[in-house]
Image (cartoon, grey):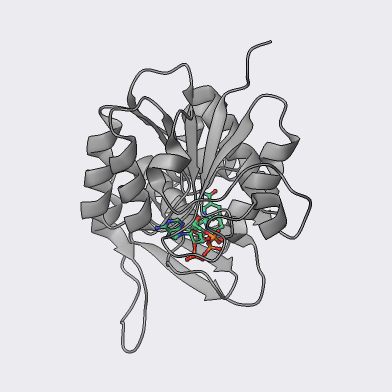
Amino acid sequence: MSELPGVAVIGPSGRMGQMLVAELARSDRLRLAGALVRPGHDWAGRDLGAALGGAESGLTVTDDPATALEGVAAVIDFTAPETTLEIAEHLDGRGAVHVIGTTGFDSEQLARLDSYGARGVQVRAGNMSLGVNLLVSLTRKVAEALDADWDVEVIEAHHNRKADAPSGTALMLGEAAAAGRGVALDEVADRGRDGMTGPRERGHIGFSAVRGGDIVGEHDVLFAGAGERIVLRHMATDRGIFARGALKAALWGLDREPGTYDMADVLGL
Ligand SMILES: NC(=O)C1=CN([C@@H]2O[C@H](COP(=O)(O)OP(=O)(O)OC[C@H]3O[C@@H](n4cnc5c(N)ncnc54)[C@H](OP(=O)(O)O)[C@@H]3O)[C@@H](O)[C@H]2O)C=CC1
Ligand SMILES: O=C(O)C1=N[C@H](C(=O)O)C[C@H](O)C1
């Protein structure tokens, strides 16, 4: 019997890294074949299972990208923007699928990522859950149906360790609302209000970020009209939804031509 496609996880000690390791251990279609930590991390050289506090897994954690990525069919990366760019550089020309869940890229970093996507398969999404990707479609549809008399606000809440704001998901939802209205998000986004801001500008899309405790991820898209409001809401209570989406993306990506894809492509939405 042939071996299952091997997957490397970048940052296996992280919140998402641990979820990905657990989902890969359960998978009957993919196998965990590499685990990369940052240089000098105290897990480097240890058995992954033991480092996670469980039974020996037979896979040694490494801080050497060449060792972790050797021969894998896909790499799942939920880390930080500069780390993801370094991984994209290592993968360039190797033919492995790069599944990117990392958020918080600036426009220059996104352009650099796109250049790697032109030569390899990248699946990139600020949120890999089915529910959020459906919410993105719904947001676009509602925005198409309503005029700019309806104020759009995206409100997100996350745990107190989150590094970036607004969340990647909030930006996906803002992009969807802007697309529904036929405008560019950059031109209408209000990404933080403080002080004498004056009345709200018609047609703008506002963002608010709440940070606290262990909130996994909550997103509301509020359409506020005169005398009525519509709220579209997604609440994540288990990071497994993102990890399972990432595994689905890795499998889907194995048969693709080079390009940058998203979860709407993977899920056929
Ligand atoms: N798209 C989606 O569906 C989702 C996206 N995310 C995004 O995923 C990212 C990670 O989130 P989360 O897991 O909560 O964050 P964590 O901080 O818990 O995990 C990040 C991991 O990446 C590791 N890392 C950073 N740099 C390197 C490097 N150079 N080499 C190897 N490992 C490295 C960190 O290691 P160390 O601890 O040593 O720094 C850490 O283990 C964020 O951008 C978040 O927004 C999160 C959930 C869902
Ligand atoms: O950092 C997180 O935790 C999450 N990040 C993603 C985002 O920025 O939207 C997805 C999810 O909401 C959890």
Vertical arrangement, residue 24 with respect to residue 225, above or below: above
Residue 123 in view here: yes
Horizontal and vertical percent position of residue 135: 57, 44
Q: Position of residue 5 (x, y in %)?
A: 57, 24
**Position of residue 73 measured from the top left corner of the image (x, y, whole percent):** 48, 27
The residue positioned 36% from the left and 84% from the top of the image is 194
For the question of whether residue 124 can be seen, the reply is: no
Q: Nearer the viewer, residue 40 or 106?
A: 40
Spot occupied by residue 210 in the image (x, y as percentages of width and height): 54, 74
Quadrant containing the N terminus in the rendered view: top right
Residue 103 drawn above or below residue 135:
below
Considering only vertical position in the picture, is 104 above or below 22?
below
Question: Residue at the bottom extreme?
Answer: 195
Query: In terms of depth relative to the viewer, which is nearer, 225 or 86?
Result: 86
The residue under the point 63% across, 43% down is 59
Q: Pick whichever, 91 or 137, lies toward us.
A: 91
Question: Looking at the image, which residue sits at the far front?
Answer: 45
Residue at 67% x, 55% y is 236
Q: Nearer the viewer, residue 5 or 106?
A: 5
| Rendered residue at 40%/65% (across/down) | 206
Q: Tell me how many marks there are.
A: 0
Query: Which residue appears farthest toward the top when viewing the image?
Result: 1
